[in-house]
Image (spheres, helix red, strand yellow):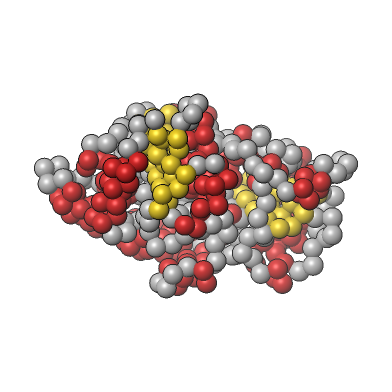
Amino acid sequence: MTLLVISPDYASHLLPLATIATAQRRPGERVVVATGPATAAVVAEFGFERIDLRLGRGSNPGVIRAEQQPTGEDDALRGFFAATHHGMVATLAYQAEARRNDLLWAPVPTAQAVLQVIEQVKPGQVIVDHLAFSATLALRTAGIPFQDVVLGHPTALPVGTEIYGYPSTWPACFHPEPADLAALEKLCISVRDAFTAEVNAAVAVLDPGAPALEDAFAAHGPTVLFNYPAALHPAQRTALLPAHRFLGSSIRTEKVAAEVRRWLDEDDDRPLVYVSFGSFLSARADVLARVVDALRPLPVRVALATGSADPAVLGELPTSWLARSFLPQVAILEQSALAITHGGNNSITEALHFEVPLLVLPFSTDQFAGAAAIETADRGLVLDPNTATPGELRRAISTALRH
């Protein structure tokens, strides 16, 4: 039998999907990953086959840079980074506007390409990223069962009266103006309705007899898998979910370079602090620089994933630190005393797996909901990345290390 994984061409999406596939793979079973070329190395590292499938314009092999994106996507990425400087509501509004174009890329041709992959591979089981809307659209209209994996915070699948893209909760350090929130809500409703109309138009082509959807963002597969711990999810919201299973976290086995392993194995009693803003938000080098300034005088070891940040902005780093553009996150978290993160779902769930306290500096999307959950569960601290000073960061780091 063949297990098919359908993923956007983004390493941050493919890594947990491939880990889930590894756990579900039966002895001798073939695994094929349908994705773009940027993540070919990730597919190869897992030992899987790859079949080419483009689900969108952008890509991310592990560290994303605007200048490496196709025309149009590069400017969109720069616009996103610029929006993060203006805070939570401005960023969410920018992402809502962008969502009109970036979540449903060429829906009918892409859905047809997905069905061609299905015909070619003939899988016995299919695992799909929930946000790969053109792919899930194809599978639903064709009546092909699949496992629908929500890789982000569970609010990525709205339930009840929730509106996709509008934050249902956020950390205490953010104080959005009511008028700004009202405008954001109105925008998100408008985007939801336009997105749903576009999906319904595609459905009418692919399956003319299918009923129209009321909210395309709330559509889902027969079984929903949440890459998130059940203990962190409110019981009242769990009651509203469709048939589902919480996976906790998708912890993968990583290859660790010899130099990184030597650094991790050094005889050093100081607590290890891991710093990473993920594949996207490392572009906010100004915030990383403040984190670096906060850590310099502290008696800690630091593993710093610089991503796409300009090293010149960070200044000269202590020679005892481990600083690379990309680091094996799981292996480092396993030995960490604290993780400083943007609050991406992979970072949060992987840190929680190893019971590592968190200092979360959320910038966008579901990072606000993820950070709020950490705050509510008393599993870490949250600061506004745009306003936190090195002194405030240093005090929060010291508090978290004593937690």
Image coordinates of residue 358 in percent, x first then y, are 65, 44
Q: Nearer the viewer, residue 23 or 49?
A: 49
Quarter of image, res 379: top right
Q: Position of residue 93 (x, y in %)?
A: 40, 62
**Residue at 28% over, 42% down:** 119
Q: Quadrant of the C terminus?
A: top right
Residue at left offset 85%, top offset 50%: 299
Residue at the outermost top position:
27
**Quadrant including the N terminus:** top left
Q: Position of residue 233 (x, y in %)?
A: 48, 33
Q: Nearer the viewer, residue 94 or 109?
A: 109
Query: Above or below — where is 104 with respect to 130?
Result: below
**Above-or-below relation of 66 to 8:** below
Position of 162 compared to 345: left or right? left
Is 348 on the left-hand or right-hand side of 187?
A: right
Q: How many marks?
A: 0
Q: Could you tell me if residue 146 is visible in this image?
A: yes
Q: Position of residue 27 (x, y in %)?
A: 50, 26
Q: Is residue 246 visible?
A: no
